[in-house]
Amino acid sequence: MKIHFSGAAQEVTGSKHLLEINGKFILLDCGLFQGHRQEAYQKNKTFPFDPKAIDAVVLSHGHLDHCGNLPTLVKKGYHGKIFCTEATADIVPIMLADSAHIQEQDEKFMGKHFQELKVPNEPLYTVKDAEAVTAHLSGRAYRTPFEILPGILVEFYDAGHILGSASVYITFQENGKTRTFLFSGDIGRAQKNILRNPEPPKNVEIVVIESTYGNRKHEPVAELRTELEKIVKNTALRGGKIIIPAFSLQRTQELVYDLHILEKEKRIPKMPIFVDSPLATNVTDLYRKHKECFDEESYQDFLSEGEAVLFFEGLHYTRSVEESKAIKDVVGPAIIISASGMCEGGRIRHHLRNEASDPKNTILIIGYQAEYTLGRRIVERRPVIKIFDELIKLRADVKVLNGYSGHADADELDAFLENIEGIKNVFVVHGESSQSFAFAKRLREKRERKWTIEIPEPGDSLDPDEILFF
């Protein structure tokens, strides 16, 4: 077999790994690269392989950096199935539709206001292109092996990252023996609310593992609500608003869950809470459909008492543009949760333009911010940030709670691998170079592990057996 690292090697977004097994090509994920506008457009528009040559696609989960370029893949000739969990099969169509809509709106805005700039004048794909992906989706249950190609079996293990997320376990025959391979996808944090903990297979030979936080340690999950409580109370005392860029899928729901607990326990004052994202509203509806993904804590905290999860008095889910615009006139204290999580699109940019210059307010960052994104510039506390080509002074307080990340930290990634027997090869991906190399160094320091540890470069094609030989 060979592994072609076509995206998210020594970078975080644009996940694409192509497996070559017995002359068949299996694409693991097809995500959007996110970064500088023109660079991202060119990188997403072309593939380092022929989409028509792909025999099957297996999807780990529904975040755009893992599924967001499926419309381009289909548009360029992929005709096969896209295998994923049942929840992911419901999530992907609404994620792609939202992505396409934002692209269409952005290109229309740029074409109208900035014609002199050399930027792409058409979206990467349209809503119609996004809709074409739905017919290819094939949802499967967790822990139920199925054949994607003759002699190649896939089984989904719960990755605990977002609703429907999975680690992809593949078994196949090669040269008369059974081989086992695991693509971790994005691994979630143990003990987080709503979803079950990550669960690796017991025995795997070859592992491709993410390293988003391969050199970091998150705040303990148990302390997150206490930190959130302090930030909300301090901002409320100033009469300010808490502006929270959050991914519509999972991060928003986890935050709403904790705010509900804090309000229920009277640890924060009651105030209006706005989830200003049609996508987050639609995703939250899917949680009610897929309660099979919930953990025991969700039942203990709410369902056992007859309360709804993610719905309570004072919480407002907005859909229309008019509802979104009206939030600007709300007097603080208030909480505004809006997408996108890296502040690169969606309604969050409008809220940041309106609120970032007011020192009474707080911008709360609760997830990873890729290089060159607006979110990263906010985390770096740049004195001036550019939004819609307008320079805004950043006077609001900036707080970061990395514990809300849907990604495991270095200790949790290590523990995930520790629970797997039989490992021979580990390929470290989905992390900035500093994170991937630090995590690989950590793994190599444990001499008792007889593993080869590789950090592929973009475009590498590697044979695990050749690495073992050398």
Image: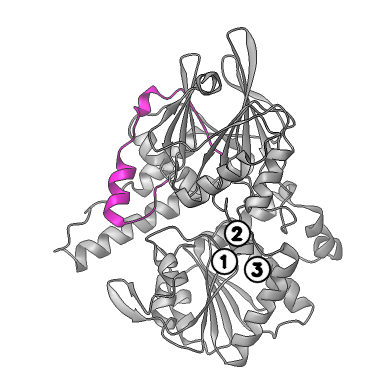
Percent position of residue 81, x then y = 50, 28
* Magenta-highlighted residues: 32-60
Per the image, label 1 sits on a secondary structure element best described as loop
Q: Quadrant of residue 249?
A: bottom right
The amino acid beneath tag 3 is Val
Q: Residue at x 44, y 47 (%)?
A: 11
Residue under label 2, please give it.
405
Question: Which residue is the extreme one toward the top?
Answer: 176
Considering only order in the chain, which callout, 3 or 2, is on the residue closer to the N terminus?
Answer: 3
Q: Are marks 2 and 3 in contact (CB under 8 Å)?
A: no
Percent position of residue 463, x then y = 49, 22
Judge whether 422 appears above or below 311 on screen. Answer: above
Q: CA distance from mark 3 to mark 1?
A: 12 Å
Q: Is residue 70 left or right of residue 268?
A: left
Residue under label 1, please give it.
366
Q: Residue at x 80, y 58 (%)?
A: 297
The amino acid beneath tag 2 is Ser
The amino acid beneath tag 1 is Ile
Q: Is residue 278 left or right of residue 189?
A: left
Q: Are marks 1 and 2 in contact (CB under 8 Å)?
A: yes
Closer mark to the observer between disc 3 and disc 1: 1
Judge whether 255 appears above or below 90 on screen. Answer: below
Q: Quadrant of residue 208?
A: top right
Q: Is residue 262 left or right of residue 3?
A: right
Specify few, some or many for label 3: CA neighbours under 10 Å numbering under 14, 14-19, or 20 or more. Answer: many
Residue under label 3, please give it.
256
